[in-house]
Image (tube, rainbow, N blue to C red):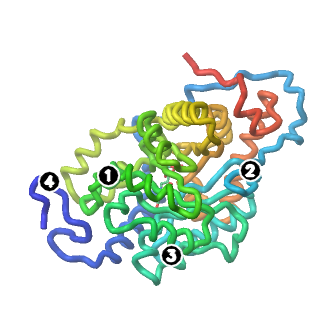
Amino acid sequence: MKNKNNFYFEESGKIDGLDLDVKLLNGKRKKEHLDISLNHDVNFKKITSGFENYSFIHQALPEIDLNEIDLSIDIFGKKLSLPLMISPLVGGIEETGEINKDLAKAATICGIAMGVGSQRAGLEDFEVKKSYMVRDIAPDILLFSNLGAVQLNYGFGLKECNKSIDMIGADGIILHLNSLQEAFQTEGNHNFKNLYLKIKDISRTLKKPLLIREVGFGISYDVAKKIISTGISGIDVGGAGGTSWIEIEKIRSKNEILRRVAESFSDWGIATAESLRMVKKAVDEKSIKKQENRICIIASGGIRTGVDAAKAIALGADMVGIALPILKSISVSIDQCVDYIKEIEAGLKIAMFGIGALKISELKNTKFLKKLN
Ligand SMILES: Cc1cc2nc3c(=O)[nH]c(=O)nc-3n(C[C@H](O)[C@H](O)[C@H](O)COP(=O)(O)O)c2cc1C
């Protein structure tokens, strides 16, 4: 049945009036997302991550030894060799099980964190649970579960969040906010009402840390303030400037009108650097007011180099997340993925050398990052 008020929206699980098996639909969508991301240009066309608007003031006399620079951080009870996580990517179809396992191997080798892709399929279909499980090969990594926050309006609640964590032995769960992505799917979940209160309820009772993230359109100051007040443990800004879900859905869509509408949204989103500034302001205000522990900030969306990572940390991030370049490299080999992560590591380290920062805490508090113009 079509929604009378919307000429193109279809009920979830139905395409062109045909009842399709929801599992098949989810699997087909995931496969299409993966294929499109790997084989098309899905970058934002008009927005950049915004890190190019910042530059470090070079310190010719750093007074430190490059080899003594320590990139490690302690976060959510785990020690990382560098402040990097593999952003949530895949799971839910059989072929992605191997990708998650390979990503977990790379994460173990490099000492970084990892999130799995949305576990909705794993909760609905016992057979695909395995595609998210990586603890057998990566027992110690900082590992995050993932679900769409909108699922809280479609039958999921605290129980499903805890089940997702248990399913993979995760250290916490990240709920993603993806309103625009869903809006550009005719079969998407379009009801984003009352999620704030539902997130608040879960945050109070969940057994592990709860984090909230955007998937590439950024978190504004007002939204950050609101979600911080729910008592969550972390925010991933998921800003614009890297992979664009509107580009992905535009390629996927068979709906001519939606494709044209997508064109007009090519400048929609808060650039990652800008969103990071807004989220940091909201986090700092809360920590000062309540004298509470500062919640964790993750910067993702278009982070492509170690210098981007260094700028993100200097702007207030505790850790950065990278998705598509890591997916592309792991689809070649684990070695290629490890090389890419090492490239980020080397860039971050040399950037710190360039401003004389010996530790991540010093980079965070540096006075040597300036906004251009
Ligand atoms: C194929 C693919 C699948 C993704 N699946 C998820 C997901 O299930 N959950 C989620 O929170 N983000 C998901 N993302 C979004 C990424 O985690 C990330 O926010 C986005 O790609 C922007 O980061 P990037 O510019 O480094 O690619 C996915 C991204 C890609 C490319």
Query: Label 1 belongs to which residue?
Result: 194
Where is residue 197 drawn, in percent x and y?
38, 51
Tell me the quarter of the image containing the N terminus.
bottom left
Task: Tell me the CA gap for discs 1 and 2.
Answer: 34 Å
Query: In the rendered structure, which disc, 4 or 3, sits on the residue that comes first in sequence?
Result: 4
Query: Label 4 belongs to which residue?
Result: 6
Three-letter amino acid code at disc 1? Asn
In this rendering, the label closer to the viewer, 3 or 2: 2
Tell me the quarter of the image containing the C terminus.
top right
Query: Label 2 belongs to which residue?
Result: 74
Query: In the rendered structure, which disc, 3 or 2, sits on the residue that comes first in sequence?
Result: 2
Three-letter amino acid code at disc 3? Glu
User: Quick check: marks 1 and 3 in contact, CB under 8 Å?
Assistant: no
Q: Nearer the viewer, residue 359 or 202?
A: 202
Task: Tell me the CA gap for discs 4 and 2.
Answer: 48 Å
Q: Residue at x 72, y 41 (%)?
A: 347
User: Quick check: marks 4 and 3 in contact, CB under 8 Å?
Assistant: no
